[in-house]
Image (tube, coloured by chain):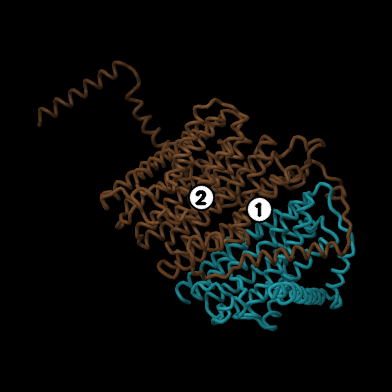
Amino acid sequence: MNIFLPIIFNLIVAFVLFITPDWKKPLKVIAPILAFANIVIGVYLLFNPNIPEKYTAWILWDNLTKLVFFFIGFFGLVLSIYSAGFIKKKLNKYFSYFFLTLASAYGIILSANWIVLIIFWGISGITLYLMMQFNSGANLAAKKTLIILGGSDSFLILGVAVLYRLTGSFGILSSTWSMIAFVCIAAAAFAKAGNMPFHIWIPDCADKAPPPVTAFMPASLDKLLGIYLLARIFSIITIPPVVKISVMLIGSITIICAVFMALTQHTAKKLLSYHAISQVGYMVLGIGTGNPLGIAGGLFHMINNSIYKSCLFLGTGQVEKVSKTDHLDKLGGLAKYLPITFTSMLIASFAISGLPPLNGFFSKWLIYQGVLAATAEQYPFLSILCLLAALFGSALTLASFMKLMHALFLGAKKYPKGAEKKFKEKFSLVFPQIILALSCIVLGVFAFDLFIKPMYGNLTLTGLWHPKMAMLLIVVGLVLGALIFLISRIKIRRVKGFAGGEGLRPDMHISGADFYEGIENGQPFKFIYGLAEKKLFDLYEVLKAMAFYVIKLLRYLHNGVLTNYLSWILAGGVIILVVIWFM
Amino acid sequence: MKTIFYFLVFPGFLFALIVGMVASYIERKVTARVQWRVGPPILQPWYDLLKLFTKESVVPENAHLLTFLATPVLFMVSATLVAMYAGMAFFFPDAAFQGDLIVIVYLLTIPPICLILAGAASANPLASLGASREIKLVLSYELVFWMTIAVIWVKTGGELSLVNIMNKPPVMYSYSGGIASVLALFVMQAKLGRVPFDIAEAETEIMAGAYIEYSGPLLGFFKMGQYILLATLPFFISSIFWGGVNVFKYVALLVIVILVENTNPRLKVKQCLKLFWFILFPLSLVALILAVVGL
């Protein structure tokens, strides 16, 4: 079977859906089936030994490509199911863009030619722009996203041009070291994945775009593609140590700054979006170490992050769907009404905080070992600071998710009777979350069998961790606890809640949105948050302000008064004459 | 099968529980003597548990039942897992089933999370407050804890295995290691939730915080988990900083915990954050720099 098939298949599907009318009911069934067909084709190709692994002229088919290849299909399937349940209007256009995105993602990772890669890279940016606008009011955010991603595309083109000058071909081949090429291509990768300083489009996008779109592009596919490009660059160019440590530092700064921003957010989607940025920091840190352990960790983290982050966005989408808001101080106590959403989001938030034995822990654990190995080489102090940033960032992530879970699902908030009818989980919205939450557990427990062995065969680890055994012991412990509980034959009595000797009143509910007010208002954080509030760290806004300042100056000249223009023309003519005279 | 024995009997659940109960007895006895009381008999922790497991469990109407029931058990299980990993390195250094430093420290964050979720699921404003205080406490000490562990890594050349760390010369016999091991004592006090870092429980302010709605066997699971942690943490700190464990070192650490507990007032949440982030963190940074320089 032809390796181009996934691209062609998705392109055809995108085209056919684009010209079909908006038949909502059949499309809701057909789109997931098509996505399933896509993943079947993908799996068939993955296990087909006839495809040569070596570089051909146009196709890359090594382990890195195969890894991303599988997960593009996986996310396509999961998110098509969710989208079918979530998106209400213009389903034909939506799914057309959806499959076009899949085609472009396959194009990027399969291409062994920079020009082809750039074309598909551009397409995936445009489809995000189009898909974001399925929510009303997302136009400005979509514009910002397009400008940043489009701007980063031009960096990519420049970088490729430099590489062409060095190697004399547009193939993705190993090349000698070039600072400009590396910085340009890394900038494009950072912008796509959402690493600082090009992260600014992600919070706006997550805030305004429909949750399935956020889960599909910024939370999963864009991460896969951006980190894929970064890993590819690291595999074809030998990076000098000073650049490695700079990349590691950028990664760790991203981790800490983004997670501190996340701590103080008051809406669920913005909170998640800052975590989407901070997790990229881990991947960049891991890949920046340049040693096999770190890169393995970075890649595994890329997969894991896509899984749990899209699960979290989907859960938030479900909450928003039933309660019509994602403001944390207006929510609470939803765990009873949305049990599956609660459980899957809880698992995903454990995974993102890196609790053993889930997948987030395993990949972070690999990254830490990679960074520790890097400390033995050069810049030991800076490397260990990076390591500390990653370790402490993990605690901050945990704190921020405890706030989220408390504010959304737990706490003392009570709803009036009959709320069950309003808060109902829909199968098509819940099923993808179950798959994603289960993958968090499975990938964590069987990480050696599912990731390390197929990707690397045998990787020498410095740490000691047996996830299967640990999981078994946890299960044994839980069973033992349940047995003790049953043997003691204790009854459970439900009583009304009390606080301070009186029954609970609705105003006694503590939402959790203000958990970290003390940190927010203490110096020096207040000062820094104040600067962030003024958008001083937002490259886009800063550049916009600068551009408007220049335009304001130019406006004095272009004020539409004819006499002014005439005098400018006259003055210009005089200057030209004078210049000619003295030449 | 052997591993399950390690987990359930020695050095896991049963062993750690008994050591923890004895430690708890010592704690209460010393506290009593400090306050000129007689103190409890040696079996008092056992009586406490027995009492809890014969009482009924009262669950608030609005609480999320599954979370409310599962968190105490998970608290105990994760504490046991830490106890086992720390104990394996000491008692069975040649066994294949070991955990490394990162694993143990990450596992140590699970009990506080269980407590936070338990408080959040209790549907009680005071429990919610307790949960929010606990997570701020975790945030405070976690930074310093990782810093002290980074000092160990610099000193031992990035060693992750507990067995190898114990076989190297003790970290504390150096300037940087000395500072780090003192800072680790602060962290241990906070991790055990003892005064002056009992802000999450603060019986006189928020009536035991996250535990407020717990009773009967469910509270019993929390108690067992606490005993196990009380047995494990001094053991762990001693193994990584003091180059191994023996009865003297363990008791010395326990006595430090108890004496600090009995001679200090409780810190406010903000004070605790300030202490860890703005006083102890710079100190740990100094220790780290000293370690990198080689002192």
Question: Label 2 belongs to which residue?
Answer: A44
Q: Is residue B91 visible?
A: yes
How packed mark 2 is, by other alpha carbons closer than 10 Å (few <14, some 14-19, many 20 or more), is few
Q: Nearer the viewer, residue A304 or A272?
A: A304
Q: Residue furthest top?
A: A562
Q: Colour of chain A?
A: brown
Q: Is residue A526 above or below residue A94?
A: below
Residue B82's tag is: none
Residue neighbourhood size for the residue with mark 1, other residues' Cα within 10 Å, grouped as few (<14), some (14–19), many (≥20): many
Q: Which mark is residue A347?
A: 1
Q: Disc 1 marks which amino acid? A: Ile
Secondary structure category for the residue under label 2: helix
The residue under the point 12% across, 28% down is: A580
Q: Left or right of A466: which side holds B204?
A: right
Badge 2 sits on which subunit?
Answer: A
Query: What quarter of the picture does the C terminus of chain A occupy?
Result: top left
- Tell me where residue B238 appears, x and y as whole percent: 64, 77
Q: Viewed as shown, does residue B116 lie left or right of A32?
A: right
* A471, B280: nearer the viewer: A471
Chain B: drawing colour: cyan
- Say which residue appears at 37% left-offset and 63% top-offset: A241
| Residue A215 visible in image | no
**Labels 1 and 2 in the same subunit:** yes
Q: Are marks 1 and 2 in contact (CB under 8 Å)?
A: no
